[in-house]
Amino acid sequence: MCGRFALAVEPEALLRFIGLTELLSVPPRFNIAPSQSVLAAFDENGVRVVRELRWGFTVRGLAAPLINARAETLLEKPAFREAARLRRCLVPASGFYEWERGGSKRPWLFRPTQGEILAIAAVWQPEAPGGPPAALALVTTRANATVAPLHDRMPVLVPPEGFGAWLDPTADPAPLLVPAPEGALTAQPLDGTVSDVRAEGPACWNPWRERQGRLFP
């Protein structure tokens, strides 16, 4: 699962990474959650563009939006199969979060070992006339060894050399629907600020510090 991520980079870095032709104003966001708007990159008539979409597919008969789509069933599940064939996009992120299971619920931040930005595979649905706005779901796959101690799923991370194939509806997406290579991510325990969905700003990345037992503060 991927239920929270961050995007806090300089606009120039985002332009270079995605291959945009126009500089964007991208305010830093350290705690992006489902139902919020997120940046997504598309190829339109041979030009790479970025738009904002809501995070969470609306599916008839389901009360809650679908925020993730499993890679293993992406091309088969009715909610996603048309989008997987025709409407794929990339969601830039500085990193994503997972939480420890059990009592502590300590959050961890996963960031790229090389560079500043990750590209998460996503599929999207258009705005319905008189209905919900255009929305997307992040694609997940089985966790690699870095993420597996915390969760058995992770977002599909598309390398730059795969951007064209993922965004091209005539290309087979299957080769890209795999876990990130070992060593592609670093893992950092955090102090818990980001666990509050209302929290924002760099404090969300405050590192975990073990408390020393002592009699007085």
Image (cartoon, helix red, strand yellow):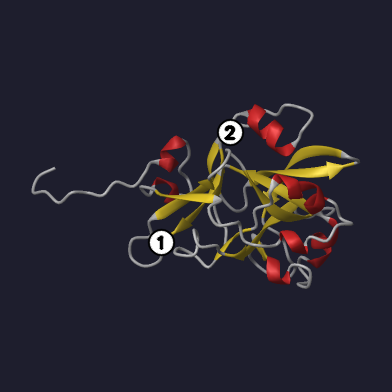
At horizontal 80% and vertical 67% (from top left) the residue drawn is: 81
At horizontal 56% and vertical 34% (from top left) the residue drawn is: 28
Circle 1 is placed at which residue position? 100
Circle 2 is placed at which residue position? 9
Q: Is residue 152 above or below residue 189?
A: below
Q: Residues within 10 Å of mark 2 (few under 14, many from 20)?
A: some
Residue nearest the observer in this picture, 169 or 128: 169
C-alpha gap between disc 1 and disc 2: 26 Å
Where's the C terminus, which quadrant?
A: top left
Instruction: Tell me the tag on residue 174.
Output: none
At horizontal 65% and vertical 67% (from top left) the residue drawn is: 63
Q: Is residue 22 above or below residue 107?
A: above
Examine the rendering and report whether any part of residue 29 can be seen: yes
Residue 150: quadrant of the picture? bottom left
Question: Where residue 22 sits in the image (x, y, percent)?
Answer: 77, 27
At horizontal 42% and vertical 54% (from top left) the residue drawn is: 107
